[in-house]
Image: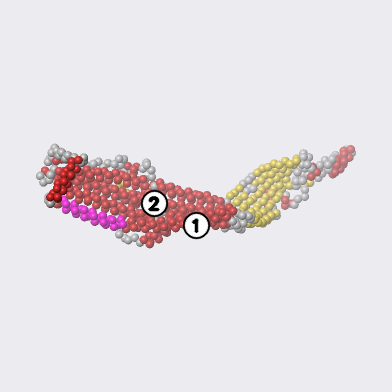
Amino acid sequence: MGILLRTAAISLALCVAVMAQNPTSKPPAADQDLSNNPLLTPRPLPAPPVPDLTRLGVTGGVLPLSLAEAIRFALENNNEIEVSRDNVRLAGTTLRSLQGVYDPIINLTPQISVVDTPSANITGGGPSSGKITQKFMTLSPSLTKQFSVGGGQYQFFFDNQRATSNAGSTSLSPNYSASVGVTFTQPLLRNRSIDIYRHDIRIQRKRLTQSDFDFRLSTIAVIARVQQAYWELVFARRDQQNQLSNLNLARAQLRMIEERISVGAAAPLDRAQALTQIATSETNLLSATQYVTTTENALKQLILHNTAAGEWSAPIEPTDQPSHDTAPINLPDALKEAFANRPELNRLRLQREINGIDIQFYHNQTLPRVDVQSTMISTGFAGAEVQQPFISGTPATNSTAFLLDQVNQLRSAQGLPAASVPLVASPVANYLVGGYGQALGNFGRFRTVTVGVAIQLPLRNRTAQANLAGARIQREQLSATVQAQEQAIEVDVRNAAQAVEITRRQVLTARAARESAEIQLAGEEKRYQTGLSTIFLVFQFQNQLVSARTAESRAEANDNQAIANFQRATSTTLRVNNVSVVTP
């Protein structure tokens, strides 16, 4: 027993020594004198003023806005949708540009030419000047058209010429020739089933449809963002009203406390608790007001056309309230609808069809080229007869002219006049004599028919073979890309459907919590009025009620946002919101 007492004494002495050496020990703080604090005076104090909720730059009248109106404004004014809409128009103009290759083409080539040719042989009909002059006037209109089926091409032509010549051998001057005919070219192997023109046009048609799917995707995305922003603004405004109600409730509690202090039923210290609650409520209200501005501007950015719109200064008042749908989601039907309607997946399917067109074209280009070429021409010809001297030339070069010269010398010696040389025309058929009308009338007398085959056999044709191999590789890549996109859509739909189910349950839970919080606050206020509770507990239950109301508003907004996201995931946004897109 003595040993135990000695051990305890030693331990106590060691503890005292350690405490004496502890540098962290501090002397007790002096009590503060709060007797002169105005919050503790029994006299009633005025309540703090209501905070100014005016927002910077928001000065116009209230703009009531329903969700349908917000979507309509976005479809009319949103710049992203306008860019997508212009992309569709651009793809349409590109398609029309490519189809222009099948437009008929009229060619006109009027020409006038003068040809001077030296005449080296006067006896061959050349003039004595030693120069043969020929003048040609031609007008050759033609009509060319490419066939949209079969890859063929035809050209209808009408050639006209007027020619004059001073050559001695010319029988008709001026003479007229007119030819009418058609030339036809038809591929038999390469370019018959598909050529570069049909390849480009078919692909552009697919790309036009792709641009339509891109437009739908952009429209769905913008509508979904409008829905998200609209319900977020609904939540922000409801939260602002909730925080304002909490502030008003705290101010009412302060007035009740002042009355109880005035009759001695409450201590002045309760006033400080109420003022603390008011200050906290004001802070939360100002934060909620700032969030209203942020969400409102986000919605305005989606529905207004530019910064000059007057609605930027108007506060938006959503007229639609969150709805709560309890209908269960049919996941298999949702997945089926998503796989059928998602624009991204349809765009990839069109890309596979484009790849099929590439494969068909490149395979066709590996074939030999065999083209049938035929020409049919009907020519008409006529002209004015040329009167030539029966005897022409000089005595030194022409024997007949030499004899005529000798005869004229004898006649001159006898005092007789020189013999005249008659003018005669070269013998030509009567139907060839006439003007341009006679030339046209001679159509059918002269015909030309030509039929041939142009054959081109590439020895290796590595370009077409490489292009074909590349297109087949792209087909494999597209198959993998489509599968990856289908998996992404599967995940997206499943997550969106689950989010809808969860938010529906959260709405019911938050609603029950809010109802319980209201009952608790009402009961605690009655307990406080009868002196069975404290103002501290009243404010605690009041804060719980504010949090419950905020959670309920948040859950309802989340529920409607989840539904909007589910519509986007299943690509039913356009149908649900009665938006029709005209297919180009």
Q: Is 424 left or right of 353, judged from the image as shown?
A: right
* Label 2 Cα crowd, 10 Å radius (few <14 / some 14-19 / many 20+): some
Query: Which stretch appears magenta?
Result: 502-525
Q: Considering depth in this image, is 574 or 256 the residue closer to the camera? A: 256
Residue 384 lies in the magenta stretch: no
Q: Earlier in the sequence, mark 1 or mark 2?
A: 2
Q: Which residue is mark 1?
A: 476
Report x, y in % for residue 483: 44, 58
Judging from the image, what secondary structure is the residue with disc 2 in?
Answer: helix
Q: Residue at x 14, y 48 (%)?
A: 6
Q: Is residue 63 visible?
A: no
Q: Can you say whether 40 is above or below 230 in the image?
A: above
Residue 221 circle label: 2
Q: Can you say whether 547 is above or below 406 in the image?
A: below
Q: Is 549 left or right of 131, judged from the image as shown?
A: left
Q: Residue at x 12, y 44 (%)?
A: 267
Residue 514 lies in the magenta stretch: yes
Q: Mark 1 against mark 2, which lies toward the viewer?
A: 1
Q: Is residue 105 visible?
A: yes
